[in-house]
Amino acid sequence: MSNHISLTRYLVEQQRVDGSIPAQLRLLIEVVARACKSISHAVNKGALGGVLGPAHSENVQGEIQKKLDIIANEVLIEANEWGGHLAAMASEEMEDIYIVPNRYPQGEYLLLFDPLDGSSNIDVNVSIGTIFSVLRKPEGHDVAEGDFLQAGSQQVAAGYCVYGPQTTLVLTVGHGVAVFTLDREQGSFVLTQEHLQVPEETQEFAINMSNMRHWDVPTRRYIDECLQGRDGPRGKNFNMRWVASMVADVHRILTRGGVFMYPWDQREPNKPGKLRLMYEANPMSWLIEQAGGAATNGHQRILDIVPTQLHQRVSVVLGSKSEVEQVRRYYAEAANMP
Ligand code: AHG
Ligand code: MN
Ligand code: MN
């Protein structure tokens, strides 16, 4: 007998303790985890499974889709449509929402996902992931796209799975953050860490430095001061990491602290940022907050933003609380400049 706690057991016990995981939500999380297991297998096969390379199509954001973007999207839809726990789904890879077909019962939840995060890393064998967010469907009418437009603070579950040296599922249902590692022999996710906390003491930042010349003043000021190291106002040296998979960068920050930034920049001034609010920034921001960190767009807590569009973008600063607060202060100071 092993005393390993499986994802199923964790969810059942969590429900007993605080009643936060009704049966439909538990089923939903388990189905998403099962889908992530399939995606992990496909990722692992790589060239042997014929899953690498472009798919010769574009998504709604005008990005070239990779084969794995489409495979992961299909796996998540097929796994989730028949269980009776969902009313509809929304994905980075689909322009419109996907309503659960009539032949299946409709449930009370809405699921949003970035099926494959870090697509530019697929073909070079670097960590990638899946991000998901769960909302409750408002009652009293047939599901429609407007039902998804809820602030991130309304999420009832959120998480990501990172396909790296290990396949790891990181989850919150609003009572802290738990980490599960895929046991490939058993085929199950096993609890490997609970009550995760973002370390406060940090000397690491994550930003795509090649965009420096396009940044706004507060971002430039914050990074400049980090780069000055011990000789500058921060009085300590900083290190930089940029995986270019948000899942991998956020996972590192959850593990050893730091700050992640994908700010607005001047390349496309009318776009608030690169990352998508509803299935990238919101779930990651909730996880980070649940682990004692903070997340802002520079002006507002990300979880307070009320979306107006399914695929809307947002500027993102998240991670260790004091660093995020410092960036937020620089935005406030810049706004008050004459
Ligand atoms: P996706 O692969 O889902 O489109 O997301 C990629 C995102 C995010 O994961 C990462 O932080 C960022 O794009 C990397 O952007 P750059 O290539 O501009 O650094
Ligand atoms: Mn992504
Ligand atoms: Mn993606």
Image: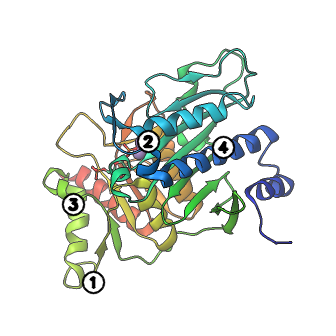
Q: Nearer the viewer, mark 3 or mark 4?
A: 3
What secondary structure is found at the residue carrying circle 4? loop
Residue drawn at the location 81% of the way across and 41% of the way down? 23
Specify whether tag 1 is near ligand 1 (CB below 8 Å): no
Is residue 328 visible from the viewing direction of this image?
no
Residue type at the position of mark 3: Met
| Left or right: 68, with 5 as reference point | left
The residue under label 3 is: 209
The residue under label 2 is: 68
The residue under label 4 is: 156
Q: Which numbered disc, 4 or 2, marks the residue that appears first in the sequence?
A: 2
Other-residue count near label 2 (Cα within 10 Å), few / some / many at <14 / 14–19 / ≥20? many
Residue type at the position of mark 4: Val
Nearer-the-camera pick, 301 or 195: 195
Q: CA distance from mark 3 to mark 1?
A: 21 Å
Q: CA distance from mark 3 to mark 4?
A: 34 Å
What secondary structure is found at the residue carrying circle 1? loop
Residue drawn at the location 63% of the way across and 55% of the way down? 171
Label tally:
4
Q: Nearer the viewer, mark 4 or mark 1?
A: 4
Q: CA distance from mark 4 to mark 2?
A: 27 Å
Q: Which numbered disc, 2 or 3, marks the residue that appears first in the sequence?
A: 2
Q: Are marks 3 and 4 in contact (CB under 8 Å)?
A: no
Residue drawn at the location 34% of the way across and 43% of the way down? 53
Residue type at the position of mark 1: Gly
The residue under label 1 is: 235
